[in-house]
Structures are given as C-alpha cells and as structure tokens.
Amino acid sequence: MANDKSTHDVSPESVAAVNQLVPMDVSGRMCLDDGKPKTLSVMIIDRSGSMQKYGGTPQKCVNDHLAAIKNPPDGREQFVTVITFADDAKIEIPVSPAATAQPLETYVADGWTLLWQTVHETLKLFCTLHRMNNPTNLKVFVGVISDGDDNRSDNTIYPKKTRKWAQIALDLGFELFAYGIGVDGKKLAEDMGFPSDDQHAFTLEASVASVQEATTHFTTRSTTHVHSGFWKKP
C-alpha cells in the first residue's frame, strides 16, 4: 500500500459525502472488524441513449445480480450498491445489505455518457469510506459496464482524476473490472486506470447476451467466487 499523503488524507468534504450517501448503520456494520468476511459489490452500469437497443435487459441483469447475492454460499456478509450514468450519475440501489436490497424498478436509457466523472466520484467515495474506517475484513469489488466512450465529463480534468483514484483503490485492495460492450474493454480499463489484464478487462460484442455475460461475470467475481488467500470457507 502506498504511504503518501494522497492515499491517507481524508478531506472534510469527502467525509461529508460519505456521511450523506452511506447510511451510518450500514457503514458501521460493513466496516465492523468482527472477524466475519464482508464484501461490497459496486456495479456501475451505462444508462446512456446508446443502451436503448438492449431494451429491458440491463434492468433484468441488475435484478438478477441482486437476487444472486442475497445468500452468499461461503458465509460472507454481502453488501451492494448499483450506480448508473447518462447525462448524470444516479444511485439506483443505495449501499445496503444484499439481503434487504430492493429490485431496480426502472431503467430508462437516454442521454450522453458521463463515464469518467461517475467512476471518479464512486471510487473517491468508497476509498474515503475505507480510509475512515480501515476495515480488515471488507473486500470491495467495482465493475464498470459501458457500451461507449465518455462524451460528457470535463476532459480537461478527466480521466486523469479517475486514474488517480483507481490507483488509490488498488492500493487499498479493491478489485476493479471493466466490461466493454461493443467497445474495447482494455482501452476502457486503461482510460480509467483499471487493470487491463485478461482477468479484469473484457471486450464483448454489442448484444443482449453480452450485457448478460458482463453482469453475470461480475456477480460471480464479486459475490459467489471464493477468493483463496483472502477468506477461508467456514
């Protein structure tokens, strides 16, 4: 883990954002060092106009993800959040225990692609939460699913700021995945500062099946997959 100030400094503004967006009872439970393994699954999925061709598939895939993680088979305590982006970013499923997370009721694809800023703000939020609490039993997984390039974020500051927080996330032990639907997944990963190896960056064809494949893979990697060396099966 890096030891410079940028990795450990927690600004008042960042703390305020955490306190506003993550319920204190949930963050306390999620970061509690009680010896019980915990997972936070952060799904970030495109909601821009180009996703219209997939119809209701993204909504179904999100709800399949939520259903699949309610009862982890390896005894971990599972937490989840789902964020979408188009002209703006939207927290669709607030941070909550997976067992009580409610289904995504609507998904309307429309607008531009605020990708880099959304990922930046998400990483900054959860890195700050992690640094505030320094949990020893929490593993954070972030998956970004997109079918197009960013055309909304301020390109004078992004994706540079996104890559900075991706590195901080990696230093804190987060696992980051990028899924390009009809676009180069490795380039998507590199733009954001995510790992671009074959285990973390994926290029899929522009199809309904690919949206399903991406979300299913992230479900498996962030919830039901047992990571040897991090946890042991109970």
Image (cartoon, grey):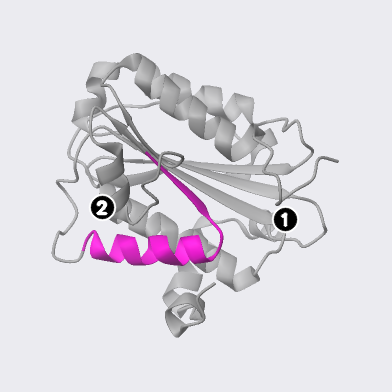
Place of residue 50 in the rendered image (x, y in percent of width and height, measured from the top left): 19, 27
Circle 1 residue: 29
Residue 17 vs 12, above or below: the answer is: above
Q: Residue at x 46, y 23 (%)?
A: 61
Q: From the viewer's perspective, is 90 left or right of 42? A: left
Circle 2 residue: 191
Q: From the viewer's perspective, is 161 left or right of 71? A: left
Q: Residue at x 57, y 29 (%)?
A: 66
Place of residue 33 in the rendered image (x, y in percent of width and height, measured from the top left): 77, 62
Asked whether residue 102 is in view, the answer is no
Which stretch appears magenta?
158-178
Circle 1 sits in a helix, a strand or a loop, which is it?
A: helix
Q: Identity of the amino acid at label 1? A: Arg
Place of residue 148 in the rendered image (x, y in percent of width and height, measured from the top left): 21, 36
Whether 168 is among the magenta residues is yes
Q: Residue at x 65, y 69 (%)?
A: 134
